[in-house]
Amino acid sequence: MNESINIDSIPKGGPYSHAVVSGNFIFLSGQTGQVPNEVLNFDQQFENAIDKIKKVLEAANCTLENVVKISVYLAYKGDFHRMNNLFGKYFPNNPPARTTLVTGFAAEGVLVEIDATATK
């Protein structure tokens, strides 16, 4: 049986769960880092997205150390090196597998979105 995880303090853009726990796996939905009525730079958005991921993982009794796979979606390829530096800050040892894509976003002003898979 699957268990949905939702965090009241993290707004959602539609009918989905912040994460689903299935067996020993936790599948996290993509998190963006924008804040309503504020314009944030790439670093701020990346750090906010990671903070949201941390909160969802905490609700599943896990941490970033439990992450085995991450996908990072960038609005601009020019942010790739900045993302790599920030990523290394959060995953300094035994980093998870990662896919990075440059894409467009449905919401205006989004510079990065991050989803993850973790294990218990």
Image (tube, rainbow, N blue to C red):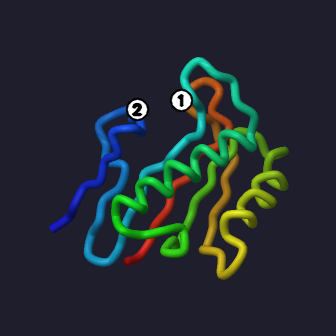
- In the rendered view of the protein, which quadrant contains the N terminus? bottom left
Q: Is residue 50 above or below residue 63?
A: above
Residue at figure coordinates x 29%, y 54% from the top left: 5
Residue at figure coordinates x 70%, y 40% from the top left: 44
> Which numbered mark, 2 or 1, is in the foreground of this view?
2
Q: CA distance from mark 2 to mark 1?
A: 10 Å
Q: Which residue is mark 1?
A: 106
Label at residue 98: none
Q: Is residue 38 above or below residue 80?
A: above
Q: Which residue is mark 2?
A: 13
State the residue lying farthest toward the left. Answer: 1
Q: Quadrant of residue 57?
A: bottom left
The x, y position of residue 2, in whole percent, is: 20, 64
The x, y position of residue 40, in whole percent, is: 70, 30
* 70 or 53: nearer the viewer: 53
Amino acid type indicated by mark 1? Ala
Residue 58 shown left or right of residue 15 in the figure = right
